[in-house]
Amino acid sequence: MSSLIKSVRGRRVWDSRGRPTVEAEITLADGRTARAIAPAGASTGSAEAIDRRDGGAAFGGLDVQGALQAVNGEIAALLAGRDVLRQDELDAALVALDGTPNKARLGGNALVATSLAIAHAAAVAQRLPLWRHLGAGRNDVFLPLPEVQIFGGGAHAGRRVDVQDFMIIAVGATDYAQALEWTAEVYRAAGRLMTEAGLLAGVADEGGWWPAFASNEAALDFLLRAIERAGYTPGQDVAISLDIAATDFGRGGRYRLARDAREIDSDGLAEMLLGWLARYPIVAIEDPLAEDDGEGLRKFTTAAGSRVEVVADDFICTSATRISAAAALGACNTALIKPNQAGTVSETLAALRAAQDAGWQSIVSARSGESEDVSVVHLAVGWGAKQLKVGSFARSERMAKWNEGLRIAEALGQGGGDLPPRESFPWGR
Ligand code: 2PG
Ligand code: MG
């Protein structure tokens, strides 16, 4: 069994928004290969690993030739002859080689594609699926509960409404396959409702229906009606979750609501959101306040955190240190875990473990710029994350991931598609 690296190659491929991105491919000494593609976000936190982009005229300045040179040059030289089974060691070497706090020199895109390719190569070397390699030693394997976008918004839909993701969670589903079935019915019902209202205008970045609504609340009302139209009891079978992505419209404690044409302060935004929590069956709310509003997040978590998941995305940027600090502050209670925010697989896992140690929930998440790469599903299953967020229920870069979960469920055999126990979520207690 060979787990030594013969060569590493970076190639330019294209993401789900038609932008250049980095694919890293590792060839093992026996000739077998493994590869991974870097995703990219549109609404990014300031502490994320920085993608290296070339600037200039081509492709809006988004080309990745510099990052590819890093993979084919320095990174390939570093990794040649090394053992892919030593992920921690190789990730640490990559981080040291980069030498910056935010991966800016070699590029977060170069690093995350390489690090994920190492994980895939380790699985290939052992002739295991990636989730099994990552979950080695665990016997309580379950599928994550899907969190799925029905309407897009915010930066993913030209700021048509302020809220970025209007999502559902099939909280009453008995297994992963059923959660997808219910999601499919709600997604369809939402599309039909919009057609009837003359509001159907295609889909947003992640495949959710384009939000041709007059207000954020109108989107919430439509979502509620879609759940009912599909035949489910809101809150009981299917609940609502939101990503406010407030960093995109707030700074220094001031928030500019474009849809409602007004500016409010941190307390005002919290009050508005708490009002939504009281009126709609919402079980999770992500980035309710901006990344620079730790005090606002603390207050919001005090007010709502016992009932709902207060999910930190921009505030923690998949950093173990930031998660521990946020937990100590009492700001948020759930971590969004995105491998490309951290930059390597080991740092992503450290963030997940920090969340677990703090008693937080965790949601493994894809980005708005995605590809056919399905690594995040394997990370979620292998690492035992209870939830998974990969955008909507349309477009192949999204469906590839939901479908991979079905294959994993089948490979697990009888009862293999089981979801985490309901009591393990705040809404089930
Ligand atoms: C988020 C993600 C996914 P982006 O904010 O959680 O919806 O979006 O990749 O643009 O950061
Ligand atoms: Mg987010």
Image (cartoon, grey):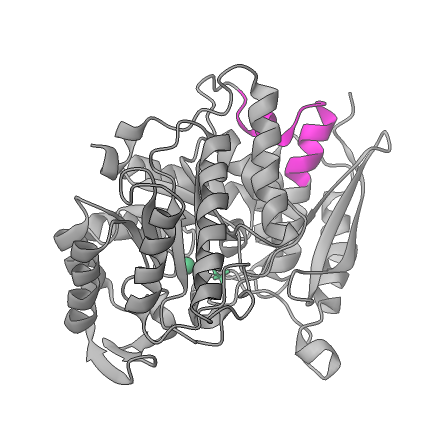
Magenta-colored stretch includes residue 127: yes
Specify the farthest residue to the front. 196
Q: x, y (%) of residue 331?
A: 22, 54
Relative to 258, say whether 208 is above or below.
above
Q: Is residue 327 visible?
A: yes
Q: Which residues are magenta?
A: 118-136
Residue drawn at point x = 44 percent, y = 28 percent: 175
Magenta-colored stretch includes residue 190: no
Residue drawn at point x = 82 percent, y = 33 percent: 32
**Total numbered circles:** 0
Relative to 27, say whether 110 is above or below.
below
Q: x, y (%) of residue 286?
A: 33, 56
- Decide if residue 236 is on the left or right side of residue 98: left
Specify the farthest residue to the top. 414
For the stretch drawn in magenta, the main secondary structure is helix
Q: Is residue 88 visible?
A: no
Residue drawn at point x = 54 percent, y = 22 percent: 136
* Image quarter in which the N terminus is found: top right
Relative to 42, say whether 390 is above or below.
above
Question: Which residue is more in the foreground, 228 or 357?
Answer: 228
Quick check: which quadrant has ligand 2? bottom left
Residue 315 occupies which quadrant of the picture?
Answer: bottom left
